[in-house]
Amino acid sequence: MKKTYKIEVDCANCALKMEEAAKKVEGVQDATVSFMTQKMKVEFAEGSDEKAVMQTVLMACKKVESDCEIFLD
Amino acid sequence: MTKKQKKVLYRIIAAAVLMVVLHFVPIQGYARFALYLIPYLVIGYDILRKAVLGILHGEVFDENFLMAVATVGAMLLGIYQEAHGQEGEFAEGVAVMLFYQVGELFQAVAVGKSRRNITALMDIRPDFANIETESGELEQVDPEDVEIGTVIVVRPGEKIPLDGVVTEGSSTLNTSALTGESVPREIREGEEVISGCVNITGLLKIRTTKEFGESTVSKILDLVENSSMKKAKTENFITKFAKYYTPAVCYSALALAVIPGIVNLLMGNPAHWEVWVIRALTFLVISCPCALVISIPLSFFGGIGGASTCGILVKGSNFLEALAKTKYVVFDKTGTLTKGVFEVTGIHPSQTFEGNCESNERAAAELLRYAAYVESYSTHPISRSLKEAYGQEIDKAKVTDVEETGGHGVTASVEGVTVAAGNARLMKRLGLTYAEDTGIGTVIHLAVNGAYAGYILISDVVKEQSRSAIADLKASGVKKTVMLTGDSKAVADHVAGLLKLDEVHSELLPADKVEAVEALIAGKGPKEILAFVGDGINDAPVLTRADIGIAMGALGSDAAIEAADIVLMDDNPEKIALAMRISRKCLRIVYENIIFALAVKAICLILGAFGYAGMWLAIFADVGVMVLAVLNAIRCLKVKGK
């Protein structure tokens, strides 16, 4: 399962940090952050609850880059 | 500017004003430090906060950390100077933070702006669809809510929101947003239209054939948005580079601050701690890797954006990068180098037949007329091209006693005259002597009233741009151009000779094409890239097998959009060379930025370490390089010759 989320991040390096952080979250198979399009694409692991996973992803991202935002809708 | 950026701007102005005022305030000692602390905190509080948070979260080495250490260090050095009875230098720390924020703001604004520019160029998303209500009024609805089979109304000037078939009206369409082609396209009732085109002249009623999510426009948007997710090698290199670079610089700075002092002490000299500490701090400021980290993805994104305005969709920065190194270009013939439609290319009446007519032209027209009539009941592509060449209404009542012989041809009575049309075998069976020395293509011999009347030549026509496209590719450094085709050797060799291709493989089955490409891949150098160009029809396996798969004429062909790495929206082969030029330019800019940024940093680092460059120069070097690199990256967006 793949989903794309709109994000807000100020610098390219911060986007990379977010990507790294998101990849480490359990339940995330793969994650890519595009600074240019301000989007995060997350591929969820099989059987994971995407809402719960995204909450953790958001927390993990806030930890590495306090200014970032992921719009979970 | 966004709200966030405006806030930073106000902070920059406030801090700058405060600094100027403080310069003239005659206060000495630690009170001065307290006063300078105000602009410092105004401009730098968020950086300090992020640096502290970073340390707490174990993310120590980032640019916030570098800036925080450098400026806090500078402030502490001022206090140290005060403690030793000198006048403390506090302005420096504030200034560094100030310029850093100016640079960050510029970067945010410039990047945000070019990002919006690029997305605006690629903005083909329709906002609404018009549906006619029962009372005859138009209602605007979200294209996503329109079901398949609904009739939508598209007025002149509006975008076609969904793929469909025209049920009423005729118009011209502007497809430039999709193809980069400025020539408008005529559209009539019964024809298919694709979303994303702009209706120019007439009112159209369209019965939709696809949901919005499946429509061309959605597919393309999806593709473009995802393109920056596939990162180029250069991009990955920079990411890795930054990972090792920042810690390395921090440790070097630490060494620079401590070792010379210790060495001095050991040698019995005064340590001069403050000299070496300030050099170490300068070192830190210079070393910020921002210019690289920001400008390289921006360059690739600009390149992809620029290409898409020419109707070239690149599915990822990695493909854009690889395209520049393409040395082998393999083409499919039909639909790629040739138009893929059969046309009458020659009418050759026999001498006897010509003798029965007044003139040569007359004989040719007559021969074509007979051919079109006799083949009028057939739906074979060849008979279709005959009818098209004839161009007049065919009265089928005039054709009687049609008899089709498989593998030979047709005989029929046209206006009471017996006409036979078919291949050489048919002529042989009728016991006629026929012209053997024909041109390249499919030959249709005709016999009228039992006498040989001549032949008509039908062949696939080479695209007008193919020849210059091949020449362009050769000129831009492609080593070998190869054509693969299922067609006969004679036809293939003829086309290859015409286009000056280096190598031809003819009479191939689809599976043979994969083998041929694999053989070429095995034979090329490790850094050379092989691109395969096809029209997406039954060459999907080859498209995926090649290093870069290029599909052309992709308008309306979903299979091609899926299988290829680069999609040419129209069927002009010249676009391949254009795409290569865009790719080259983009890569050149990327390398320019890497070399320029690293060179300036290296020079400044050395100058800083030996004390020739102060903190002011350091911050100018950092911000300046970044500004120039970003401006250079934005050039990728502009495509020459458009």
Image (cartoon, coloured by chain):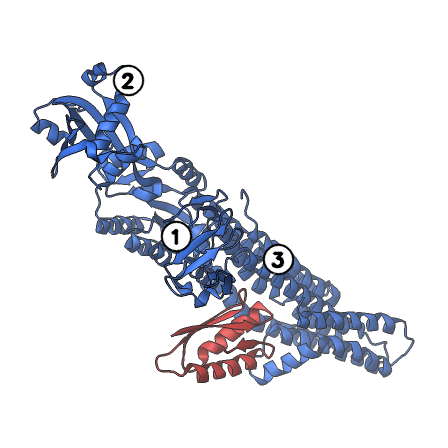
Chain colours: A red, B blue
Disc 2 and disc 1: Cα gap in Å? 44 Å
Q: Chain of mark 3?
A: B
Is the residue B367 above or below the residue B206 in the image? above
Using the rendered image of the protein, determine whether residue A68 is visible from the camera's viewpoint.
Answer: yes
- Work out whether residue B311 or residue B377 is closer to the camera in this orientation and state it: B377
Please provide percent x and percent y for residue B366.
25, 23
Disc 2 and disc 3: Cα gap in Å? 68 Å
For badge 1, the amino acid type reads Thr
Quarter of the image containing the N terminus of chain B? bottom right
Q: Which residue is mark 2?
A: B360
Q: Which SS class for mark 2?
A: helix
Tag shown at residue B167: 1
Query: Between disc 2 and disc 3, whose residue precedes?
Result: 2
Please provide percent x and percent y for residue B642.
53, 44
Mark whose residue sits in front, 2 or 1: 1
Query: Between disc 2 and disc 1, whose residue precedes?
Result: 1
B498 on left or right of B117: left
Q: Chain of mark 1?
A: B
Which picture quadrant has residue A3? bottom left
B307 on left or right of B326: right
Residue drawn at point x = 60 percent, y = 66 percent? B289
Tag shown at residue B629: 3
- Work out whether residue B382 or residue B289 is closer to the camera in this orientation and state it: B382
Residue drawn at point x = 55 percent, y = 79 percent? A64
Q: Residues within 10 Å of mark 1 (few under 14, many from 20)?
A: some
For badge 2, the amino acid type reads Asn
Is the residue B174 above or below the residue B239 in the image? above
Mark whose residue sits in front, 1 or 3: 1
Which picture quadrant has residue B368? top left
Q: Are marks 1 and 3 on the same chain?
A: yes
